[in-house]
Amino acid sequence: MELTFIGTGYVGLVSGVCFSEIGNQVTCVDKDLDKVARLNKGEVPIYEPGLQELMEKNTASGHLKFTADLATSVQNADIVFICVGTPSLASGEANLEYVEQVAQDIALAMNGYKIVVTKSTVPVGTNDKIKQIISQLSPHPFDIVSIPEFLREGSAVKDTLRPDRIIIGTSSERAAATLTELHKPLTDEIMVTEVRSAEMIKYASNAFLATKISFINEIANICEKVGADVTHVAQGMGYDKRIGSSFLQAGIGYGGSCFPKDTHALIQIAGNVDYEFKLLKSVVEVNNDQRFNIISKLNHSLGSMQGKTVGIWGLAFKPNTDDVREAPALDIIKTLLQEGAVVKAYDPIATENFRRFFRNESDVQWCDSAMETAESCDALCLLTDWSEFKEIDLRELNGVMKQPILIDGRNVYSKEQLADTNFQYYSIGRPELE
Ligand code: NAD
């Protein structure tokens, strides 16, 4: 099929590349001319394992192209996918300006029947709005479909080629049949439902996962006070198939471009129909507090932070991505600077993206390796569980620091690894190791 993906971020680019890989003719469109130029030179503007290779292969075979020419791409397409961002407004609601702009652009370009699919995460009712915008501006027939995206950054290619499920939300049998056909090579778990339910499935799924994270983080905080080990507790809980073991890793809370914004948006969606989503409000509050556990542990171990050198390992909101949006490291480093600490920071991939969040970049010493970061530090904080940090030689690390204080925000190290070191070690919900 001829497919057009509008927006070449994590969702649009990865989806475009993967659908070209399974035999479709794909055009990826972006209004960012610089991004399009880079893509046409074969540069991948985001870090995503496996993406570069598939992109090279499919551009070389002629199945995949990049352009800023939205109109021609829409005209050539059977199916047009909207994959632009829906960031949070100050109110917490999703900002729909990019989605609505693209809906107008599609309408003005249409030259015959099209299926318009929204992959962007949008509040319930948005696809009805998109339908209205297009029908007001275009005389051509079209169908609207919501196919929410569930890929995870860091394993986006794998998730797109082997998704757990595909949700197709539409009232059109014709569109449902075409999209079922398109997704068949990826999975048998294809569910067709109405548009509003599909829109809600995305928010409910992310809210539920965020709830699991905040739940285990609160259990971890209690474990610290009662002398239990949260990793054992989570393991014991996870054997119960009704609970499952995923998303029960205690730490410093979730970040990224989806959970924070989607939880806020769902609170607003509920609020707009006079429903107070009390549970989700607490989930957000717990998450906002959890990252500051690192600061409390630093205060506890170092006393005043004034003039102390603190190393930070990990800036991305999770491993295997360069995405730093809403990363806990942002709040933690800003607080450390406010408290007068000297901050050294390192991430295997995300440093360049992270630095842009600091007006005065020289406030932080940006390092090129994990060991360089730790050198002469009074304390070191692990904030992202990159495998590079898991595999580090802790005895060597012990040797290069000024004071052996290690704060592990992701429960990466075991008792065995810490043996033969004299670290003052703090993790999350494992008081026995302290
Ligand atoms: P992103 O910000 O990385 O990329 C969006 C892209 O759209 C940008 O390149 C931007 O230049 C482009 N764009 C904006 N307006 C445009 C226009 N008028 N014409 C052409 N291009 C335009 O966004 P993302 O992370 O890929 O997320 C996209 C959507 O998918 C969001 O709604 C997000 O919530 C949802 N989502 C994201 C993820 C994820 O892990 N990133 C996962 C699931 C769902």
Image (cartoon, helix red, strand yellow):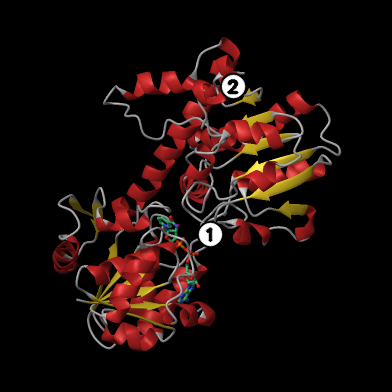
Q: Residue 398 in the image: x percent, y percent?
A: 66, 31
Residue at 34% x, 67% y is: 53
Q: In the depicted view, which residue is nearer to us: 108 or 68?
A: 68
Specify the quadrant that holds the C terminus: top right
Instruction: Confirm if mark 2 falls within 8 A of ligand 1.
Output: no
- Residue 134 horizontal side relative to residue 224, left or right: left
Please give left or right for residue 110 compared with residue 389 in the image: left
Residue 289 visible in the shown view:
no
Query: Residue 373 versus residue 189: which sits nearer the camera?
Result: 373
* Circle 1 Cα neighbour tier, 10 Å, few/some/many (<14 / 14–19 / ≥20): many
The location of residue 399, given as percent across then percent down, is 69, 33
Is residue 48 depicted above or below 408 in this figure?
below
Secondary structure at badge 2 equals loop
Nearer the viewer's eye, disc 1 or disc 2?
Answer: 2
Q: What amino acid does circle 2 point to?
A: Asp
Residue 87 is marked as 1
Q: Is residue 372 left or right of residue 384?
A: right
**Image disc number at residue 30:** none
In whole angstroms, how far apart are the C-alphas of marks 1 and 2?
47 Å
**Residue nearest the observer in this picture, 230 or 74:** 230
**Mark before the other along the chain sequence, 1 or 2:** 1
Q: Is residue 126 left or right of residue 19?
A: right
Task: Please tell me how many numbered marks the rendered image carries.
Answer: 2
For label 1, the SS is loop
Note whether ligand 1 is within 8 Å of mark 1: yes
Give the residue number, with chain letter if any, for mark 2. 420
- Up the image or down, 1 lies above or below 319; here it is below
Residue 174, position as x, y percentages in the image = 14, 69
